[in-house]
Image (cartoon, rainbow, N blue to C red):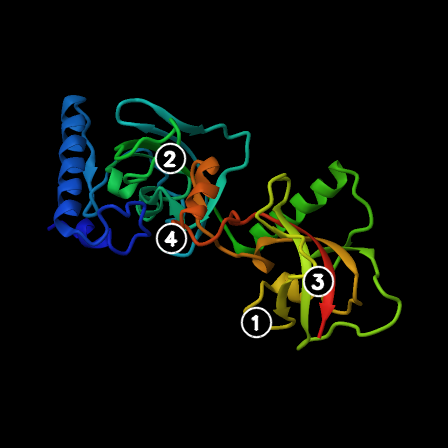
């Protein structure tokens, strides 16, 4: 049995129907392998086969580029098609910023782009030929993604970012968004939040401190998006956290500190103070659907700021 048969058990499952049924899994893998080999042979494509089951051609080499290694933060451009030629997404316009992911387990969907990063240097372009079990498996989304689709992916591994570069990019993005939308009253904290006290709340009473259990209503958004990542407006059953608890998103501990009851705040937070290195999903429009089906653990995109609008309704 090829190594990828075992590996599929540790990839987060886009195929609940065959999960745990080894014979069906092997049949699906054998089908994908056969169809992909036939495609390569039919089109006289001389590609290198990898132990995981995908193939690649190095279209552009970068001998002096830095090798991509585990835990690197990588920006890419790409074009994804089925082997039948149906376009899923073309994002190869280099006048736009690259899409960014962490080169680590669970860093990106489809997974083959993540795996192939370990073969690439900064600036190189690879053409990948990918069986569906390393792509979207039997997942389907409208007419954009059909189940069991083998893919051909052209990807440029454009840039390796440092953590500090990502923090700077996000900080500039927040500043630009505030300026472009003519927002006022936001102050940058030493930790990197942009915080606005919309209302100070009660003029007397308890001021929040670490260890308080607080309740709040809120709307949480990816910066610039209209659809909420999560929200709750029920003052009778607010979201509750123990302020200062390390298990909280860090920006919540920072933003709610020193407030009085009924205070209202707005916050822009960089990702390193929020959800961190979440799984990147390509194309973007399937992300929420994958989250709702529990195929990815977080709906928030990686390396992008979030925006919180909240009201403090309980302090204990």
> Counting residues from the N terminus, which is met first, the one under dot 3 or under dot 4?
4
Alpha carbon distance from label 3 to label 2:
39 Å
- Quarter placement of the C terminus: bottom right
Q: Which residue is mark 2?
A: 155
Extreme bottom residue here? 211
Instruction: Identify the mark nearer the N-term, 4 or 1.
Output: 4
The answer for how far apart the CA atoms under marks 4 and 2 are is: 18 Å
Label 3, label 1: how far apart the Cα atoms are: 14 Å
**Residue marked by disc 3:** 255
User: Do we see residue 191 in this rendering?
Assistant: no
Closer to the N terminus: mark 3 or mark 2?
2
Q: Secondary structure at mark 4?
A: loop
| Mark 3 or 2: the one toward you | 3
- Give the labeled residue for mark 4: 106
Find the distance from the CA under tag 1 to the CA under tag 2. Answer: 38 Å
* Residue 65 position by quadrant: top left
How far apart marks 3 and 4 lie (CA) works out to 29 Å
**x then y, percent, for residue 70:** 37, 56
């Amino acid at each position: 049995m090829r190594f990828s048969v075992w590996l599929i058990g540790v990839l987060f499952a886009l195929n609940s129907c065959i999960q745990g049924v080894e014979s069906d899994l092997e049949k699906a893998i054998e089908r994908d392998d056969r169809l992909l080999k036939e495609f390569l042979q039919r089109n006289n494509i001389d590609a290198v086969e990898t132990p995981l089951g995908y193939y690649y051609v190095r279209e552009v080499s970068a001998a002096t580029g830095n090798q991509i290694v585990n835990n690197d933060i990588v920006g890419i451009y790409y074009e994804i098609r089925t082997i039948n030629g149906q376009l899923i997404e073309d994002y190869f316009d280099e006048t736009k910023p690259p899409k960014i992911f962490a080169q680590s387990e669970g860093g990106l969907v489809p997974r083959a782009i993540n795996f192939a990063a370990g073969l690439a240097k900064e600036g190189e372009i690879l053409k990948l030929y990918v069986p569906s079990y390393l792509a979207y498996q039997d997942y389907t989304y409208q007419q954009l993604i059909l189940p069991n689709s083998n893919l051909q992916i052209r990807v440029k591994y454009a840039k390796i970012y440092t953590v500090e570069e990502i923090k700077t990019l996000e900080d500039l993005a927040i500043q630009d968004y505030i300026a472009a939308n003519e927002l006022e009253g936001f102050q940058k904290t030493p930790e990197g939040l942009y915080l606005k006290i919309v209302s100070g709340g009660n003029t007397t009473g308890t001021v929040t401190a670490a260890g308080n259990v607080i309740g709040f209503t809120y709307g949480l958004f990816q910066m610039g998006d209209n659809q909420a990542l999560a929200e709750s407006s029920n003052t009778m059953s607010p979201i509750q956290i123990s302020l200062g608890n390390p298990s909280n998103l860090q920006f919540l501990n920072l933003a709610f500190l020193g407030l009085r009851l009924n205070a209202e705040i707005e916050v822009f937070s960089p990702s390193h103070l929020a959800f961190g290195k979440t799984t990147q999903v390509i194309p973007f429009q399937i992300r929420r659907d994958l989250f709702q089906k529990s195929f990815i653990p977080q709906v928030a995109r990686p390396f992008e700021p979030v925006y919180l609008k909240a009201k403090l309704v309980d302090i204990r």
